[in-house]
Image: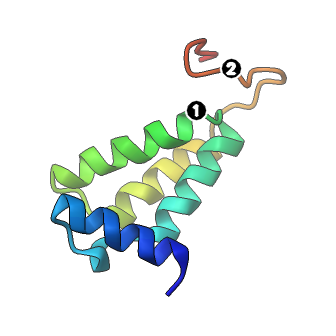
Amino acid sequence: MTTMDEWVTAVCAELGLDPARVPVPAVLDLTREVAHQVLRPGAPVAAYLVGVAVGGGAEPAAAAARINQLAANWPVELGSEGSADTPSR
């Protein structure tokens, strides 16, 4: 078992969730895409928003795929990295 597996299992136990329902690769892909294509602080926020959508009934892989596509098509502006408290978009 990897450290990631252990972490996900522990967090799921705390939150009463089934770790088998956590699409770790999809979440990692999502956060990487947002961090690299939009801005770094947007990655955890996007992951949270996908979680909210899933909690509301969205299918996890489909929700993550939609946000990955949005991030992939996000217009790149040089020098627009921004920060959590200084939105650049």
Q: Is residue 52 left or right of residue 62?
A: left
**Element on which disc 2 rests:** loop
Q: Toward the viewer: 37 or 6?
A: 6
Residue count near mark 1 (Cα–Cα under 10 Å), binned few <14, some 14–19, many ≥20: some
Q: Quadrant of residue 81?
A: top right
Where does the C terminus fall, quadrant-wise?
top right
Along the horizontal axis of the image, is 43 left or right of 80?
Answer: left
x, y (%) of residue 2? 54, 81
Query: How far from the left and from the top, in percent, is residue 61?
Result: 38, 66
Mark 1 touches mark 2? (CB < 8 Å): yes
Q: Amino acid at mark 2?
A: Gly
In the displayed orientation, state which residue is furthest to the top.
Answer: 86
- 8 up-or-down from 69: above or below: below
Task: Give the image location of residue 54, x and y in percent.
Answer: 24, 55
Amino acid type indicated by mark 1: Pro
* Structural crowding at the residue carrying mark 2, measured as other residues with C-alpha within 10 Å and reported as few (<14), some (14–19) or many (≥20): some
The residue beneath circle 2 is 82
Disc assigned to residue 58: none
Q: Kindly identify the residue that appears in the image at 45 percent across and 37 percent down.
A: 45
Q: Residue at (75%, 21%) from the top-left corner?
A: 80
Mark number, residue 41: 1
